[in-house]
Image (cartoon, rainbow, N blue to C red):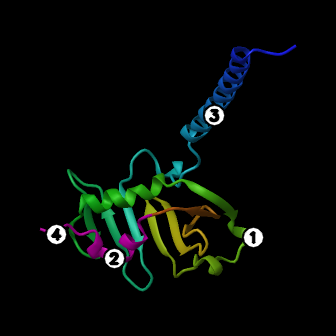
Amino acid sequence: MQRSSSSKRRMINLFLLVMLAGLGYLAYQQVQIENKGGETLYDPAIGESVDEVTILLPGQPAIRLESGEPDWQIVAPIEAKADSRYLQQLFTLLSESVLAEYAAADQDLAAFDLTDKAIRVRFNQVEYALGSLNPVNHRRYVLLNQRILLVNEAVYELLSRGVDGFRETP
């Protein structure tokens, strides 16, 4: 028995419709996974608001910023008004997605530049050490709570500017 060309077309169209529905379902599942979001650098121990930020650069005095009314202030090593644009950029660190994680106990921290020579930033009492870039994917190693996390961050250069990177300029 031979099928007519319209019957063949219907079968092909039905097959294509089923394939399209399957691809649509896979795309929907991927969007749901992405919307759930993965782990970020935010640590619940920071609390609901950040009142103090401390930046520790090797060989330099600690930079301390405090939340004030209405603006943030640099309180050490100088006293000056902090530039809100740069603070906003700094706070983006907390929302960076964690791309990979390693237990710090099993690793040589020097291999990731996460020793005392690392730039450190503390939000309230939670400290992050920023290490070197992964040479393959150019993501940064961050030490947090005895875990080495791999993230795509954009604040290292800002932190390395020191206090002048946060001072508001007239």
| Disc 3 to disc 4, C-alpha distance | 48 Å
Q: Which mark is residue 106?
A: 1
Mark 4 neighbour density, 10 Å: few (under 14) some (14–19) many (20 or more): few
Q: Which mark is residue 26?
A: none
Q: Return the disc, 2 or 4, that comes first in the chain's sequence.
A: 2
Instruction: Give the number of the mark in front: 3 or 1.
Output: 3
Instruction: Give the number of the mark in front: 3 or 2.
Output: 3
Residue beneath the point at 79% across and 15% down = 3
For disc 4, the marked residue is 169
Q: Return the disc, 3 or 1, that comes first in the chain's sequence.
A: 3
Residue beneath the point at 47% across and 59% down = 125
Residue 132: give x, y in percent of width and height: 55, 76
| Disc 2 to disc 4, C-alpha distance | 14 Å
For disc 3, the marked residue is 29
Q: Give the magenta range.
A: 154-170
Check disc 3 and give the amino acid type. Gln
User: Does dot 3 land on a helix, a strand or a loop?
Assistant: helix
Q: Quadrant of the C terminus?
A: bottom left
CB under 8 Å between discs 4 and 1: no
User: Does dot 1 land on a helix, a strand or a loop?
Assistant: helix
* Vertical side of 8 occupied by 168: above or below: below
Check disc 1 and give the amino acid type. Asp
Check disc 4 and give the amino acid type. Thr
